[in-house]
Image (spheres, grey):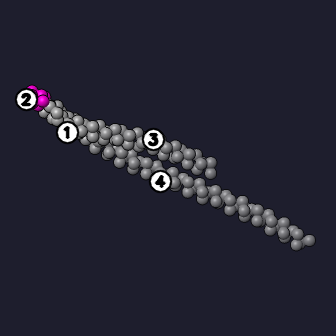
């Protein structure tokens, strides 16, 4: 039983650590999404409020192209991050299943011990009762 308790504690620790990893990845993904949104807003507003100067339009156009390239790179990073999140979520699911197995085994073991104690007590009471009636 002590082994099962240890395994359950180790399993719980693994689940906690995996949850931390997953939370960090989700935070990073959220930051990437926010950065993409900011870049998209910036790219949409590049041409607005420019004076009638062809040089400024040309520079703004190059800047917008560069922003679109940055957005593309960030979206690729986000896709990779989401794949990693999916893998880590699967790991967490497996760790939860392992933890639950240990919990069930421990509960069964505890129920078995309790049943054995109850049977032993009942046997002792039966023996006391038999001694009392035998006299």
What residue is pinned by disc 3? 20
Nearer the camera: disc 3 or disc 2: 2
What residue is pinned by disc 4? 97
The magenta region covers: 51-59
Query: Which residue: 30% across, 41% down?
Result: 33
Q: Nearer the viewer, residue 41 or 101?
A: 41
What residue is pinned by disc 1? 44
Res. 30 image quadrant: top left
Which of marks 3 and 4 precedes in the sequence? 3
Query: Which residue: 84% across, 66% down?
Result: 128
Report the Cα–Cα distance between label 2 and label 4. Answer: 64 Å
Q: Nearer the viewer, residue 51 or 117?
A: 51
Residue 93 x %, y %: 43, 51
Tag 4, which secondary structure? helix
Which of marks 3 and 1 precedes in the sequence? 3
Nearer the camera: disc 4 or disc 3: 3
Residue 52 x %, y %: 9, 30
Res. 82 image quadrant: top left
Nearer the camera: disc 1 or disc 3: 1
């Amino acid at each position: 039983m002590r082994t099962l308790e240890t395994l359950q504690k180790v399993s719980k620790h693994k689940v906690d650590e995996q949850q931390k990893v997953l939370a960090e990845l989700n935070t990073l993904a959220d930051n990437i999404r926010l950065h993409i949104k900011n870049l998209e807003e910036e790219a949409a507003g590049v041409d607005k409020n420019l004076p009638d100067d062809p040089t400024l339009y040309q520079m703004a156009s190059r800047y917008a192209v560069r922003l679109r390239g940055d957005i593309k790179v960030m979206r690729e990073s986000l896709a990779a991050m989401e794949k990693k999140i999916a893998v880590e979520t699967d790991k967490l699911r497996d760790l939860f299943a392992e933890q639950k197995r240990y919990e069930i085994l421990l509960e069964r073991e505890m129920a078995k011990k309790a049943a054995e104690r109850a049977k032993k007590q009942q046997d002792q009471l039966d023996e006391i009762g038999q001694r009392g009636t035998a006299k």
